[in-house]
Image: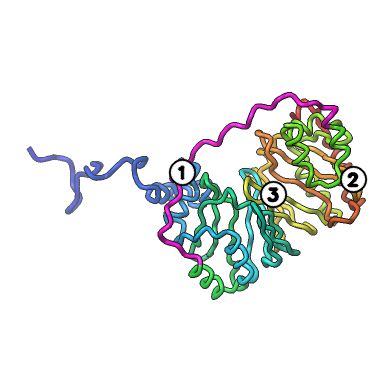
Amino acid sequence: MPSLAPRPLGGRPIGERPQTERPLAERPLAERYVELRRSLPQLRARDAAQRLGATEAALVGSGVTGPATPLRPDWAALIVACRSLGPVMALTRNEHAVHERHGRFEEISSGPGHILVLGPDIDLRLFPGGWAHAFAVGGPRPSLQIFDKAGEAAHKIFALEGRTDLRAWDALVASFAAPALPPPPERATPRAAPEAEGAVDAAALRTDWLALRDTHDFVKLLRQHRASRRQALALAGDDLSRPLDPAAAGRATLTLAAEQQVPIMVFVGNRSAIQIHTGLIRRLLPSSGGWFNVLDPDFNLHLREAGVASAWRVVKPTEDGAVTSIELLDAAGGVLAQLFGARKPGQKEREDWRAIAAEVAERHAATAEAAA
């Protein structure tokens, strides 16, 4: 007996799924992304990948966010080649902080396990040992996007309309294109839980902390004492690491620096890249989505305040005197952002920055127990 369901002209019964149509969860990643964007058109690739249970590298590599050309993983040469591009926007982020800086790639050097990019605008510490995939993405906003072995974004470089040398950009892409490379993993794997924090000799940690002569030796101090950063900050004593209100410390520090026009250094990083802004900040704007923003012409910072689980005013001895920072940590104890007064090696810390850090510490102090 023929179906009595109404049929559109030349079509199947209304409301009946064709036999070849698969459930959304079983469709290719690109199809699922297009469907997701229909309901959430402003969703960024990173957030879309998380919703789809996929890696951002696989999403970008599929070409659905723009034509994607795989690039050969000759990391130092790729970064050096960026000097030819002229002004670009460099972007480094983690889950709760995004750092965007306009400028040129200038002085570049590399060594075992690291690439340094130094200049007044683009200032990077890159660790390519964790990198695995890179794509040149076309479309109205061309970009170079580098991903780590887990498929998470390590660093991105965007062309600036009317400023970037697009002929040099095309030449770079042609030189590094490697379409036969294996694709990145599609499924996101859960990040391993942080190692359990063991016992730490607080007195010995404090003694060695007071003996520091360079801020870069702080990571060595943590390794030496087998302490997490969060543990060390909680144990060192208020003179060296004072806990702050995580809901207020970042915004308060940035606001005072902008109001008083004190030049600062803003560090944001992930597992394989750190990006630094040095200079003044001016235009601050909170958003309805829970992000606090610096929106200056050549520097943008986006800080998801709900992601700040603990905050600290930190003092590290150096050969140039004490250096003070405001450090924002996530729930796992990882660094979201660090704020310093602008300085170069050999210079003493700015008194106006030190005064800002002291004011934030007094106005937004928290107990060590609450911060830990």
| In the image, residue 113 lies in the stretch drawn in magenta | no
- Image quarter where the N terminus lies is top left
| In the image, residue 193 lies in the stretch drawn in magenta | yes
Cα–Cα span, label 3 and label 2: 22 Å
Which quadrant of the structure image shows residue 87? bottom right
Which residue has dot 3 on it? 268
Front in this rendered view, residue 218 or 44: 218
Disc 2 on helix, strand or loop? loop
Cα–Cα span, label 2 and label 1: 45 Å
Which residue has dot 1 on it? 54
Front in this rendered view, residue 300 or 16: 300
Which residue has dot 2 on it? 322
Badge 1: residue crowd in 10 Å (few <14, some 14–19, many ≥20): many
Cα–Cα span, label 3 and label 1: 24 Å
- Report the amino acid beneath label 2: Ala
Query: Is 6 placed above or below 259 here?
Result: above
Instruction: Find the magenta span and give its range.
Output: 176-205
- Report the amino acid beneath label 1: Ala
Q: Residue at x 82, y 40 (%)?
A: 314
- Report the amino acid beneath label 3: Val
Q: Position of residue 246 (x, y in %)?
A: 74, 36
Query: Is 142 placed above or below 194 here?
Result: below
Q: Earlier in the sequence, mark 3 or mark 2?
A: 3
